[in-house]
Amino acid sequence: MGAAEVIEWHMRMQERGIHAEDARIKWPRLMQFKRSLIDDISTHREESFSKSGIATLQGRAHFVASAAIQVGNDVLEAANVVVAAGSRPADLMIAGPEYAVTSEQFLELEKLPTRILFIGGDYVSFEFAYVAARAAVVATILHRGRRPLERFDPDLVDRPIRRTRDLGVDVQLGPKVTSVNQDPTGFKVHARSETGDHEFTTGMVVHSAGRVPEIDDLHLAEAGIDWDPQRGVKNEYLPDVSNPAVYAAGDAAASLGPPLTPVASYEGKIVAENLLQGHQKPSYEGVPSVMFNVPPLASVGLQEQAARKLSLKFGVNQGDTSCWYFSRRVAEFFSVQVLVEELSGLLFGAHLLRSDAGETINLFALAIRKGLTSRELKDCVFAYPTPGSDVVYMV
């Protein structure tokens, strides 16, 4: 996304006296750089484990007893077992699912085809389609529902959709993919909607229609563990409710937290504390989520519709901030929506569509998690001119 953002800045700033000739993405070189950042992470992590006295085994694990795991020919018995197995792409429930590559495989491509079709309308599709479009790829997104990006406020979602379409990405809402077939020219994707049957020709199909816990082959029944194939190991305080010797964290846990990397890390810390000291219940209040498009779309706390269903009394500070100084300086359209409780001034939610959204949303996350009021935020003296200094006008 950083590479796509550079291209975006170049095109957007030309009217402001900035000219960078021949700005374009060289995909093989970009992939080489990406690998230089991440290829050694696993090795370095394992070396760190070893120095700390932690043994690692590679392989598919499964339970053979209530607190015993088998990996290959080795059986490990313990007082406690932590399940943190992550997630895998959900079953597409279509004919020809093997022809769709995963998001991980997409990020390992040596070169991009001229046409790519994304199944699903989650943030992964929009982020990848944006990058593909900036790399001169013809991209299509098929989302079977009428509302993509459901994790974000619907009042702000329309603008990223329009922006994506303006890039030339064909975003179609409603078609449900039924099959994928390979032919000499690439792939044929068949879909059905209220208007009838549709066929799409593409050079690659990307599965971005959601993920599920990767626990189906862990033989959880052998350990007496209550679990949901779609949500994970059921628990409230992160130990399993049916087998207290087993803990779960991250995507493998059927917790109330959203499936995000920082949430998995947070739950891992709670598990460690509970193993050592007792039983702490995780709090998911004030957890932000960001779609790293251009501009990014960020959200924390309640959406307006959810707050009204709870009969909360609040005001909504919202509007287009494109005329604000920071917006004009970077030639970008911005929108904000902040929910403020009428009497106390507590913040219920914040939803930002801004180039700085990924950073500024953290200020609102802190305020919601720590119970700060709009008055307390306004009392802060922020560095100026910075994106964060706009917060006092948002609340």
Image (spheres, rainbow, N blue to C red):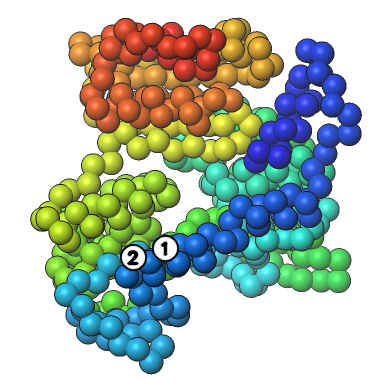
> Which residue is situated farthest in the front direction here?
51
| Horizontal relation, residue 340 to residue 338: left or right | left
Q: Is residue 51 left or right of residue 204?
A: left
What residue is pinned by disc 2?
52
Task: Please tell me whether mark 1 sits on a helix, a strand or a loop.
Answer: helix
Estimate the x, y position of residue 395 in percent, counting from the top left.
Answer: 37, 12
Could you tell me residue 92's position as x and y percent?
55, 65
Q: Which residue is mark 1?
A: 48
Name the element at disc 2. Answer: loop
Q: Residue at x 33, y 65 (%)?
A: 52
Mark 1 and mark 2 in contact? Answer it, CB < 8 Å.
yes
Give x and y (percent) for residue 49. 38, 66
* Residue 153 appearing in the image: no
Classify 7 as above or below 27: above
Compared with residue 252, is residue 378 higher up or lower down, i.e. above or below? above
Estimate how packed mark 2 is, as few (under 14), some (14 to 19) or many (20 or more) residues with alpha carbons within 10 Å. Answer: few
The residue at the point 20 percent across, 13 percent down is 344
Residue at the image position 65 percent from the left and 41 percent from the top: 1
| Residue 279 appears in the rendering | yes
The amino acid pointed to by label 2 is: Ser
